[in-house]
Amino acid sequence: MTTSATRTQSRLICLNTLNMKRQMPAIERIVALCCRHAGLVVLVSLLASLAASVYTATHFQLDTNSERLVSAKTHWRRREIHFDKLFPQQNNLILVVIDGATPELAQRGASALTEKLAGLKSLFPEVRRPNGGAFFERNGLLFLPQKEVAQTAQQLIRAQPLLGVLAADPSLRGIMTSLDTLLQGVSRGQTQLGDLARPLATIGRSLSGAANGKRAFLSWQTLVTGARPTGEETRQLIEIQPKLDFTSVEPGLDASNEIRKAARALGLTPEKGVRVRLTGPIPLSDEEFASLQENSGLLAAAMFAAVLAALWFAVRSARIVLSILLTLIVGLALTTGIGLAVVGVFNIISVAFVALFVGLGVDFAIQFSVRYRAERHLSVDLDEALRSTGRMVGVPLALAAAATAAAFLSFLPTNYVGVAELGLVSGIGMIFAFGLSISLLPALLSLLKLMGEPEPIGLGFFAPIDSFLRKNRSTVLRVAAALAVGAIALVPSLRFDFNPLDLRSRKVESVATLFDLMKDPLTSPNTIDVLAPSLNAAKQRAARLSAVPEISQIVTLESFVPADQQGKLALIRDADLLLDPTLNPILTRPPPSDSDVVAAMRSTSAQLRSAAANDRSQAGAAALRLADALGRLVVGSRRNRAIAQEALVPGLETMLNQLRSALTAQPVTLKTLPPDLVREWVAADGTVRLQVFPRGKVLTNDDLKRFSDAVLSVAPDATGTPISIQNYGKTILRAFIQAGLASTAAITAILLLALRRVRDTILTLLPLLLTGLLTLATCVLVGLQLNFANVIALPLLLGVGVAFDIYFIAAWREGTRDLLSTSLTRAVIFSALTTASGFGTLWISSHPGTASMGQLLMISLGWTLATTLFFLPALLDSATDRGSATRHQLVTERVDLPNQARGAG
């Protein structure tokens, strides 16, 4: 009898338990199950995260090629890809900019560095000089106007006596001998000392510097022609296509380091009159990552400390903070592993999912933990408090996770591949963040056996604000409406900065060098390429383009065939007949010893003083200064004489070699052009390239747009940096507009399905809309432009805003009216503070793009909190229907039951 009764009682208990389970909401059942098997849940979670971490470590790949961030299906990317296939040597370049104190030093440095790097084929498949090399050295005079060729020939012929001595003895001794020869002419009355004023003053300045231990380099070109060198003459360029490692965040770092190493080995340093700088797509990309890493350790430490502080103030328990952090770590590991398996390779944007996961994943964990503390205050039983927490926050969390995931996944159909993949991985992350918040987190809290909460968890000091909002809801709504109207008026003034250079620090070498090049239209990288099927078609296209006012010149292959060659070649040959024996002497003197140099300097100094003895002119003063400098060098250190040699002799050798080469010019035709040069302008299939240069400086976004629009009006198939920048910006804007519309539709559908009321759905979306308007209006007021970096923050802001609004709407539907004094508001505030702590530190980054992202995040988070805490409660209070009081009473009774039970206990 007893056994039968026990069995019957057991069956009743089982039936009651089963009935209770059926009545439990699904999420509450999940929480209860995880608490009951807490150890197993933690073990499985840790093993799964470990497996995901191992997979990530063995399969991780990062594609840093920024060209792949936009779909190759877009019309402008198709044109770029087509151009790159025709002229692959024009893609992924390092541009070496060599500035010399003199034209000779720049030329000498460029020649030496080109030769050295060209020998490293495994690292540098392509090395070329767009404005130099053997072809230009031999035929450079042919590209000058015929009048200038005649003037240059006459100047060389007049300098023949000087050149003859220097060619036979290109050394300091030879320079002294040439001065002696000129001074002997003065003493014999064959010339005047005033005729030597320029060379005496020029050489005197250089040797005076050497006598003081300083290098003052001399331009022999200036000495011979009397013309000051132009910036184009003192600057040489080398274009290099290196072997790249796109699995590295700095794919061209090894190549750049090798170039700098080679330059130092060749003595191409500022101390020796040469400055070598690197710019171009590869150094720009590499140095951007380097600048992002600058102070990254300090920023990470500050970010982590701020997040820990915010979590502590949110939950007031080190063990709960530890549980939240462990939940985030497991979720991040799982998201990384699964995301990598889905996308295959992360790109430089999709890796930002880490920040998005932490920013939103911590919100779910904080919501659950703070609600748990509130329930724990009401219940003495730990598992009951956790189950109750799952019952109370499960649906809002699920709804927030679904809406946020939908917002991220809305980027998938867009052409902005970088953000599309970011959206896919972040969407996966939201699923894990939610799932772990209702499984691993309660399991950890259950294992930790936390003590009860003696005090209420809500924010009681907010009660007066609740009362104020309830009494003045109409005023609050009118203020919100006025702010919205003002924001709508300001938003059209918001600008999107299309230029990626504005996101980079101008302190780094590549950016500073690029802006330096942009000051000169002839070296500006902002050129546009146009293709033509043949040389004849290229002529026709060039003729049409030359009529465009915004274009200064069009370069094609035919631009390298000089005009009026017959007359110029005649002048060059006449000069060569006279100068060839001078520049190519049969006998040359061996290099002098230091004692030979000292003797030559002493002799020249004496002759200078003799020639200037009775001369009070500027020439006499210049002769005395030079004599004084030579005297100091004679009695000075050997090091100073070596400095004098560095300042004068290398440039002299370069100048003599250039003259020898320039006087051997031959007729230039399309058929005689060097194959390497032809390959730059005519593709293998015969397609001809036209390079279009802008008129004047193209520095601003408006300049770029005006130039690109002008070219596209004549050549719609054109491509190049100015056009790419414009289209890149348009593609990104279009992607965010498309994703914004799609996410709005998806979120609206999710809310309608879950809330089942159009009114409640509208109430959820209105604060989000107001937040967006106020954020954009604030950007206008503070002068913050949207750009490629900070616009990526918008998905995070959308997710945070949707989640907060859903939490409040769900609480309101449950009957809660004084929202600000509840534990929900505590969770929302500290969730926002945690996100702000994590991302607000970006504002202090030295990288302009990162700093603008931090600034936009802080602005938007501020407005998100403001609209959630003040506008939404007033809006909800105005929308309260007749049944709300009844619901409020029922909820109050339900909440009071645990207190009564605890008191009875």
Image: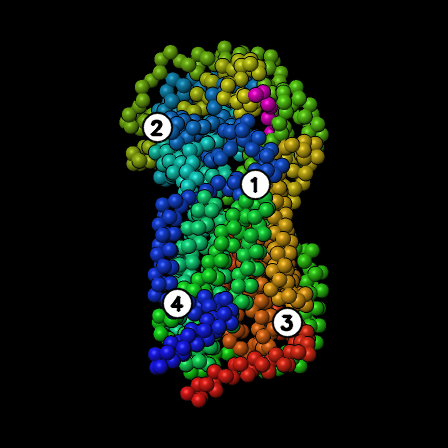
Dot 4 falls on a residue whose secondary structure is: helix
Dot 3 falls on a residue whose secondary structure is: helix
Q: Give the amino acid at mark 1.
A: Ser
Q: Which residues are magenta?
A: 685-692
How far apart are the two marked residues, 2 and 1, measured between alpha carbons? 69 Å
Mark 3 / mark 1, whichever is N-terminal: 1
Q: Residues within 10 Å of mark 1 (few under 14, many from 20)?
A: some
Q: Give the amino acid at mark 3.
A: Phe
| Number of the front mark, 1 or 4 | 4
Q: Which mark is residue 71?
A: 1
Pointers 3 and 4 in contact (CB under 8 A)? Answer: no
Residue 375 location, x and y as percent?
Answer: 46, 77
Residue 800 location, x and y as percent?
Answer: 55, 63
Pointers 1 and 4 in contact (CB under 8 A)? Answer: no
Query: Residue visible at 64% across and 71% down?
Result: 871
Q: Residues within 10 Å of mark 2 (few under 14, many from 20)?
A: many
Instruction: Give the residue pinned by disc 2.
Output: 601
Instruction: Give the residue pinned by disc 4.
Output: 443
Mark 1 / mark 4, whichever is N-terminal: 1
Residue 892 location, x and y as percent?
Answer: 56, 82
How far apart are the two marked residues, 1 and 4, measured between alpha carbons? 43 Å
Q: Give the amino acid at mark 2.
A: Met
Instruction: Give the residue pinned by disc 3.
Output: 871
Mark 2 / mark 1, whichever is N-terminal: 1
Location of residue 803 with respect to 817 vertically, above or below: above
Query: Residue visible at 53% across and 17% down?
Result: 673
Pointers 2 and 3 in contact (CB under 8 A)? Answer: no
